[in-house]
């Protein structure tokens, strides 16, 4: 998770994009469709029109937030694999308090988002406690907390949070006045994406350009050395861990507020995991991770269009981001070996 | 070390700019139908049935078809919009969970018809499909009522949902019609997958004297059939034709999902869609009551005849089967 030179990043990104493009062409041929049509649909469906761009941005909101959440944790040496669970915790909080909040929409939204961020931060606490007191690796505990969160969502939409009207496993709907409206008509992008990008800039600033960020990075890079110069390692780790959880929780809250309006089961298509992939692709630099998240969002929207227009199974298109991340990691490792 | 902006940012920005100027999307001509499924169409169940329906629409109505698998609720609206923007004539959202998104998009695209498989929201260009499985459940009840020796029947459900209870209400009505004074007892196991729990429930009901078992327990139905086999009593299949699954199955109450899709598409194509809930029962052929040929020898011919005439009355509307209000 160290810094890389711009030249090296360029080489890595170029290799990865080439590999992903090759994979895409191969897969469409395999599915019996024309690669030209498929690529056209991919571009058209992700950035080809105002509506398509809106879909990409609507998808990107959650991914940008989980990507910066992952970067923040990774840079401080915390392997928070539990973003999916924290995302769900935030969504549950939003669905639980959202319909109860009354008053001005602005106040209700603020209350909902605070509850989501808190829920995300709280969901890391068991893992943080187990790591600090019992030495349980956070990789393990956060993965398990993801499973618990998914099961909790499934139970809640059929129990405590179920919409009393009707027979369906879904939570009560947010009032229309509270939900975020599109920024421009004909597009689905809301103010949520603006908030996500602003947070990405803020986190980048804090991590890369403040004394606190330096301490976090030092703790992540060389824990022993950081301790030796008197940095409170455990506290810094906890700070990064819970801030990471809060960002993921916020992502879940914004998803309910801006996109779905309720909690469903299953609620997430792996926003937390995609965030981790985006962070890896961006070398754990928050801004690069946010840009990678945008790329993943565009690929997601584009691959849906590919399926709609050319009949290429959606599953094939989801292989592409996987190829991207794997190539980046492999290319990076190879370049590091050469240097050593 | 000073951080540098990622090259990826530049690459995606370039992609944004260079792709922004491609031409307008191709407009579909003729009758076009699209399907959104919440899961893979290879599931041999809920989603496969819908895709079969879409293929049948292509074949029988000459429609151009398109399908997309939706990976999370955040995509519902995106997919509806994308199809509506291409002037797709009819878009199916395969499940109740598509209602909200369909209602929002339907307002903006009045010339596209949106249909959700189950649900309750309607608009001039939006309606749910409702399967009237209750009609076939009533016939199952009538058969059991005529054939029961003990006057007691059992009903095994998965989760206690209004839609499940509604089929039990219809079965019970049929049972009492066939055996005045008879009782039908419901048991809910709390799970649609718990085969062992469903079997335990079936055995308990048999031990209480029930000699017929109705079930609406999805995959857990296998447990009911096993229990019925062990106690040498009769059971009924539901949702799918489950006659081949066990010799204990006397008949099945079947939903023909592909047929419902074709009927709906035909209605839209012929300009007969009116924004009313699309109810499919015995009359449409979507719901059917199917005897198990292997077990039919044990059924008195008078019961077969009576079932046939009851079915006719339901088809013609002369008799209305009770259903839950949900």
Image (cartoon, rainbow, N blue to C red):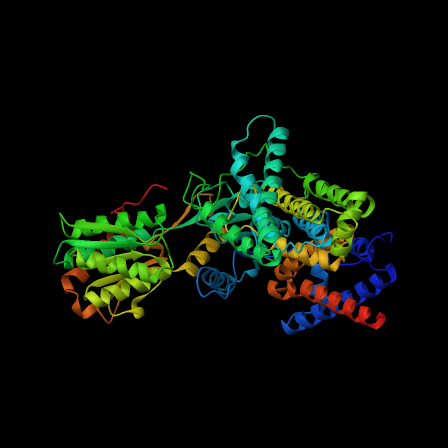
Number of numbered callouts drawn: 0
Q: Which quadrant holds the C terminus of chain A?
A: bottom right
Position of B178 compared to A337: left or right?
left
Position of residue A307 measured from the top left corner of the image (x, y, whole percent): 62, 61
Quarter of the image where one finds residue A143: bottom right
**Residue A45 makes an appearance in the image:** no
Position of residue B101 measured from the top left corner of the image (x, y, whole percent): 55, 45
In front here: A1 or A236? A236
Position of A295 compared to A251: left or right?
right
In front here: A323 or B212? A323
Residue at x 71% of width, y 46% of height: A236
In front here: A232 or B131? A232
Q: Which quadrant holds the N terminus of chain A?
A: bottom right
Quarter of the image where one finds residue A192: top right
On screen, residue B207 above or below A111: below
Position of residue B139 measured from the top left corner of the image (x, y, whole percent): 24, 55
Position of residue A129 measured from the top left corner of the image (x, y, whole percent): 58, 49
In front here: B272 or A164? A164
Q: Residue furthest top?
A: A103
Position of B297 compared to B9: left or right?
left
**Residue A97 makes an appearance in the image:** yes
Position of B82 compared to B18: left or right?
left
On screen, residue A166 above or below B250: above
């Amino acid at each position: 998770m160290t810094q890389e030179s711009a030249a090296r990043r360029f080489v890595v990104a170029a290799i990865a994009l080439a590999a992903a493009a090759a994979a895409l062409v191969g897969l469409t041929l395999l599915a019996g469709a024309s690669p030209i049509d498929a690529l056209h649909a991919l571009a058209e469906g992700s950035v080809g029109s105002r509506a398509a761009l809106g879909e990409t941005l609507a998808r990107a909101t959650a991914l940008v937030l989980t990507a910066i959440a992952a970067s923040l944790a990774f840079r401080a040496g915390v392997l928070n694999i539990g973003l999916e669970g924290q995302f769900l915790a935030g969504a549950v909080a939003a669905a639980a308090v959202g319909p109860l909040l009354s008053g001005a929409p602005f106040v209700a939204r603020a209350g909902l988002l605070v509850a989501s961020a808190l829920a995300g931060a709280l969901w890391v606490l068991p893992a943080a406690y187990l790591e600090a007191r019992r030495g349980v690796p956070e990789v393990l505990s956060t993965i398990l907390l993801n499973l618990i969160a998914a099961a909790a969502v499934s139970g809640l939409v059929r129990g405590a949070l179920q919409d009393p009207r009707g027979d369906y496993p879904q939570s009560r709907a947010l009032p229309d006045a509270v939900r975020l409206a599109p920024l421009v008509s004909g597009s689905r992008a809301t103010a949520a994406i603006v908030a996500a990008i602003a947070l990405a800039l803020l986190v980048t600033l804090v991590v890369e350009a403040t004394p606190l960020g330096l301490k976090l990075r030092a703790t992540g890079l060389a824990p022993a050395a950081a301790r030796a110069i008197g940095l409170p390692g455990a506290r810094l780790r906890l700070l990064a861990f819970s801030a990471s959880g809060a960002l993921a929780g916020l992502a879940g809250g914004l998803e309910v507020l801006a996109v779905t309006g309720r909690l469903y089961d299953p609620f997430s298509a792996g926003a937390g995991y995609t965030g981790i992939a985006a962070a890896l692709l961006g070398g754990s630099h928050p801004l690069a991770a946010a840009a990678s998240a945008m790329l993943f969002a565009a690929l997601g929207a584009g691959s849906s269009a590919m399926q709609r227009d050319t009949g290429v199974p959606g599953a094939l298109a989801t292989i592409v981001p996987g190829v991207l991340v794997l190539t980046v990691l492999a290319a990076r490792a190879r370049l590091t070996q050469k240097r050593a | 070390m000073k951080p540098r902006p990622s090259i990826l940012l530049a690459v995606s920005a370039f992609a944004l700019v260079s792709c922004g100027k491609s031409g307008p999307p191709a407009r579909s001509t003729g009758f076009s139908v699209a399907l959104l499924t919440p899961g893979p169409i290879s599931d041999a169940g809920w989603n496969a049935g819908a895709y079969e329906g879409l293929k049948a629409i292509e074949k029988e109505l000459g429609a151009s078809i398109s399908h997309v698998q939706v990976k999370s609720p955040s995509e519902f609206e995106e997919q509806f919009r994308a199809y509506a923007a291409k002037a797709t004539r009819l878009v199916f959202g395969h499940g109740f969970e598509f209602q909200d998104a369909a209602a929002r998009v339907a307002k903006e695209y009045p010339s596209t018809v949106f249909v959700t498989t189950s649900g309750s929201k309607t608009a001039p260009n939006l309606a749910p499909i409702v399967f009237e499985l209750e009609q076939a459940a009533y016939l199952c009840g009538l058969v059991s009522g005529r054939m029961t020796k003990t006057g007691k029947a059992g009903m095994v459900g998965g989760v206690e949902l209004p839609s499940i209870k509604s089929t039990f209400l219809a079965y019970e009505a049929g049972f009492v019609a066939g055996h005045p004074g008879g009782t039908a007892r419901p048991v809910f196991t709390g799970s649609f997958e718990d085969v062992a729990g469903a079997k335990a429930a079936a055995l308990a009901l048999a031990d209480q004297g029930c000699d017929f078992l109705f079930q609406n327990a999805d995959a857990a139905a296998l447990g009911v059939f096993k229990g019925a086999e062990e106690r040498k009593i009769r059971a009924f299949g539901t949702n799918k034709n489950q006659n081949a699954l066990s010799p204990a199955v006397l008949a099945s109450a079947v939903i023909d999902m592909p047929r419902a899709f074709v009927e709906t598409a035909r209605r839209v194509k012929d300009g007969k869609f009116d924004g009313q809930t699309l109810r499919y029962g015995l009359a449409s052929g979507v719901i059917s009551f199917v005897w198990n040929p292997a077990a039919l020898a044990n059924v008195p011919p008078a019961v077969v005849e009576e079932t046939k005439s009851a079915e006719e009355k339901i088809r013609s509307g002369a008799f209305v089967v009770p259903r839950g209000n949900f």
